[in-house]
Image (cartoon, rainbow, N blue to C red):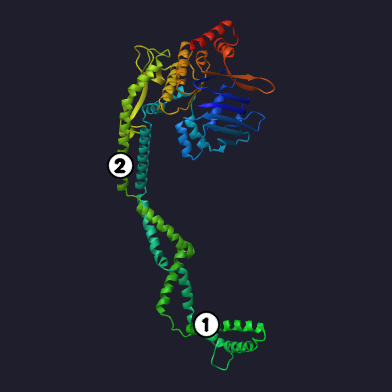
Amino acid sequence: MLTSLTLNQFALIAHNELSFAEGFNVITGETGAGKSLLLDALSLCVGERADTSMVRHGADHADIYAQFDVLDNQAVQQWFNTHERELEEELLIRRQLSSNGRSKAWLNGTPVSLNELKSLGSLLVNIHSQHAQQALLKPQFVIDWLDDMAGLTQLAQQTSDAYSTYQKLTRRAEDIANQESQRQDRIQLLQSQLADVAPLLAVNYAQIEAEHEELSNIEALMQEASQALALLDNDGDEPDVMAMLGRAIKLCDHQASVSQTFAQASEQLYIAQEQISEAVSSLSAYAEQQLPDPERLIELDTLISLGHRLSRKHGLPISDLIAESAEWQQQLEALQNEPSSEVIAEQVAAAWQAYLLVAQDLSEGRRKAAPAIASELVNQLQPLALPNARCEFVFTSKAAERSYNSNGIDDIELLFSANVGMPMQPLYKIASGGELSRMALVMQVLHATRQDHELAKPMLVFDEVDVGISGATAQVVGELLRTLGQSQQLLAITHQAQVAAQSHQHILVQKHHEEQTQSELQIISGDAQIDELARMSGGVIITEITRDHARSLVAAVK
């Protein structure tokens, strides 16, 4: 449960600290006093997006601190385990809004992302907006509410997912059918291109080029090898390197014992003599080799010519062309692995059958649960000045299979009648604003109480809970909220004294006009609460008559 909320430089609030009680907490105040600010702050602490206008004028940033007691909340404990965070008995959420548009959040002093905060916030606070009655007019709201009340949310999601899979496969089948001829043309082109470059892929083209260059000049190279040999080592009268190197070694050896320089030079010359000897052997073998097979040169010529032709054809250097061929191979394999029209048709049929299976289970579950849920709805509506209220969920099988959708195989309407002898009709046709408001409230309360009693429930927040009601009906609404507060924490904004009098804790919002307008929130009781209830009942001028009426409201609760 929420134990405290601290606001600093938030909108019209300079600084405010509030403690919250178990049960039913109510917020009242004159129009424009800033009652919704408390809900706005709480919404930010559970992951809603920020607005720079929420930073008080003249301040650099606003800070909001929300503290929760989560000792017995298993869902929150599981969230902390899943997100590998440490959980203490108290949970402190801090949200900071900067005037430059930036927003930060901390969880027990550790930074937390907005997405994480939102997922945690859904376990802590459940906010019902004042627009719930408009949502009632949307068929999807009724369907989702019925599924939630019937415990069919997971099956409904499976149905939606199955239909989505069927749709994706259907679109893919259409694409494959439309592109079949282009696909075959592309396969043939890629196969032709890969066949062209296959000889180049079978060899190391860089080595082929080097070998071709050498064999094309082999006779000249052999001749120059012979000339190099003559300079290095020959049997004639011409001086050669090996002979002169031998004489130099002898001179250095002769003085090696006298001078270290000669000793080092002698060692280096021996190494040079050995290396030159190896060069002589290599050049000799090269100069005396047999001329290569002419067919090898022809083979190399063919590969080089093919490389040049393909390079011109595709406008790419040979190295890039070889790399591009790898991409061609991947494209070809992808196209060849694409399922045929027959295969994809079988997949579409299988997906449709899978959808029908879960959709029929969902339909049966809804039809089975609907009467009891409608009866429960009526039982809650009748005390709210609707003694003759009747409700019924009507299922109409869709006319054709092509009309089936992610919601299932039925159209579902919630029919309502508030008057004896009048037929039930869809809400949007007959319900007044007050009737819609009461229906929305009851549906929200039933939704809130649907959860497993063994689990800690999130705090319920109702914005403008009493729209369209007054008098005795407001009294019943207040009693309903107080009863609900026996099992979980509630926070509600109200304009009705009968509702506010039922609260376990009363929070008053007042606006002060000094140097800078400021809203103040305070917990009231005793005479202060009587005065506020009197104001809500009688208007601006508070008399002893309105105070007596307020006292009677509080006394009735006690």
Q: Residue at x 55, y 84 (%)?
A: 228
SS under mark 2: helix
Query: On the image, which quarter does residue 546 sit in?
Result: top right
Q: Residues within 10 Å of mark 2 (few under 14, many from 20)?
A: few
Q: Earlier in the sequence, mark 2 or mark 1?
A: 1
Q: Label 1 is placed on what type of residue? A: Glu
> Where 328 sits versus 73, above or below?
below
* Pair 2/1: label in front: 1
Q: Position of residue 200 (x, y in %)?
A: 42, 67
- The residue carrying mark 1 is 278
Q: Position of residue 99 (x, y in %)?
A: 63, 33
Q: Judge whether residue 398 can be spotted in this image.
A: no
Q: Which residue appears farthest toward the bottom when viewing the image?
A: 237
- Mark number for residue 184? none
Q: Is residue 264 left or right of residue 47?
A: right
Q: Label 2 is placed on what type of residue? A: Ala
Q: Residue at x 51, y 39 (%)?
A: 85
- The residue carrying mark 2 is 350
Query: On the image, which quarter does residue 361 sit in?
Result: top left
Q: Which residue appears farthest toward the top when viewing the image?
A: 545
SS under mark 1: helix
